[in-house]
Amino acid sequence: MVALSARDKAARRRPVPLPVKGRYRRIKTVVAGLLLGLFFLVPWIRWDRGGDMPGQAVMFDVPGRRFFFFGLEFWPQDLPLVLGLMVLGALGLFLATTISGRVWCGFTCPQTVWTDLFFTGDRLADRIAGKGTPAAKALRQVFWIGLSLLTGFGFAAWFTDVTTLPGRLLGGGLSSGLFGTVAVLTATTWALAGYARERVCLHMCPWPRFQSALLDADTLVVTYDSGRGEPRGKKRLPLRADLGGPGGDTARGDCVDCNKCFAVCPTGVDIRDGLQMGCIGCGLCIDACDDVMGKLGRPGRLIDFASEAGVVPKPRRLLPRPKILIFGAAMMVTIALLGYGLLAVQKVTVDLQPQRNPPFVRLSDGSVRNDYLLRVDHRLPALAAVAVSVAGLPGATVRFGESEGPTLALGEDRSGSDRLMITLPRNALDTAGLDADGHKPIILVLTNAATGRVIERENSYFWGPP
C-alpha cells in the first residue's frame, strides 16, 4: 500500500484530533489538571500578614514592588534570585530534553495544556450540538471565549487580591492596568489556543530548532519500529513469516495503515515518516497504536519511546552521559547558590542619604546639625517602629522631623521614611574628634522600638566646621 503524501495528509488532517485512551493520555490529563489547578487555585490560598498587608499567599504586588510567597517576601534587589531560578529552569529543561526528548513540549508547555483544553471544548460542542453544524461552531466560540476570559481572570489574580477581583471586574472597578491584563490575556489565549494551536509549535516556538543539539543516540524519543511494521498493508493480508504469519509475496508487517497515529497527533505528524521537528513527544500516537494492536491480537509498542541505542544495541555505559553529568552538576551548583542567596536575604533595608547642601548647619546656640533622609523597609513579621541612635559621636542627639523624637514609625506597608537630624552641641565640638576637614565616621544604630533589639547598623559621616 502506498503511504499518503505530505499534501494528502495535510488535506485529510482533522481540525480536532481524535480522542484516545491509554497510558500517556492519562499522564497528560493528570499533569494538565495539576498545572491548571496551580494556575487557577494558588491565588486563592490565604496567608495572614497582619495589618493592611495582602492576605494572599502568592502574589506579585506591583504597586509595592514586592513578590509574596507564603512567609517569604522578595524585593527588586532580589533580582539575582529570579535570574537563578530562570537558570535552574533552563538547566532542568536541557536535562529533561537530553534524557527524554521533548517531554516539556508534550506534557507541560502552556501552549500544549491550553490547546488540549480547547480540543476538549471542541469535542464537547460537537457532542452537544452535532458535529459540523452551525450550532456546534457557535458553541465552540462560547467555550473558547469562556476559557479565554477565565484564563485572563486567572492571570490577573496573581497581581491583585483575588477575593475582590470578581466584583471589581463585573462592577467596572478595575484599574486600567489590570483591565488591560485581562483583555490581553483573553485575546491571546483565544487566538493562540483557539486558532494558532499547532502552528505555535511548528512555526513560532524556537525550542524545536535547537533541541537537536541536546538529543543523542541515548535520548528517548517517540519512535516507529519500521523493521516490524513495514511493509504496511490491510488486515486481510497475511503477516510476514518472521512475525509468525504465513508470509508470501503480499505479506505485510504489523502496521495496517489505519492512520490512527496520525489522526490523534495534535500537531499533525505521522511518526512513521521518522522523527520530525513537529513531534512534541506527547505519546498519544503510542496509545492509539497500542489500542489497534490489541484489537488485532498483536503485541503493542509498535510505536514507543525508544532511543537509537535501544533500537540498535550498543555497549552499556558505566557512567551517565557527559551531558547529563554536566547539566546535573550545574543544577546542583545553582540550587546551592539559590539556597545561599535565600539565607543571605536582608530582612531590613536602610537607605540613608546625607543632605550635603550645605554639609552642615550652625544653629543660633552654636551647635552643629547634619540633615539626612532615612528610609527603612523591612520584611519582618512584626516591627511597628525603629529607634535610632548614633555611635561614635559623644553628646549627639537624634530626632526626626515629624515625630520630634528618635523614633520612626513604620506603616502597614512595612516601610517608613522621614528627615533625620543629628545635632552636636557646641560644648561637644572640641571633644567630638572631627578631623582637619571637619568630618568624622559615625554609625547609625537602628533598634526595634518595642524590644530594644538591634536590627541594623548603617555607616555614615558627620560634618562640622574644620
Image (spheres, rainbow, N blue to C red):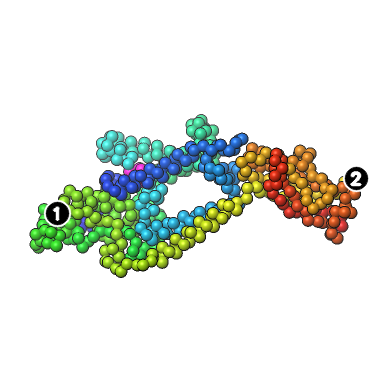
Between 187 and 304, the residue placed more toward the observer is 304
Question: Residue 77 at what x, y percent from top left?
Answer: 60, 52
Question: Residue 42 at what x, y percent from top left?
Answer: 47, 41
In the image: residue 444, left or right of residue 7? right
Residue 205 in sight in this render: yes
Residue found 45% across the figure and 39% down from its top: 41
User: In the rendered image, which residue does mark 2 sit on?
Assistant: 365
SS assignment for the magenta stretch, majority: helix
Disc 1 element: loop
The residue type indicated by label 2 comes to: Asp
Between 224 and 383, the residue placed more toward the observer is 383
User: In the rendered image, which residue does mark 1 sit on?
Assistant: 234
Q: Which residues are magenta?
A: 115-119
Residue found 78% across the figure and 51% down from its top: 391
In the image: residue 409, left or right of residue 239? right
Between 135 and 148, the residue placed more toward the observer is 148
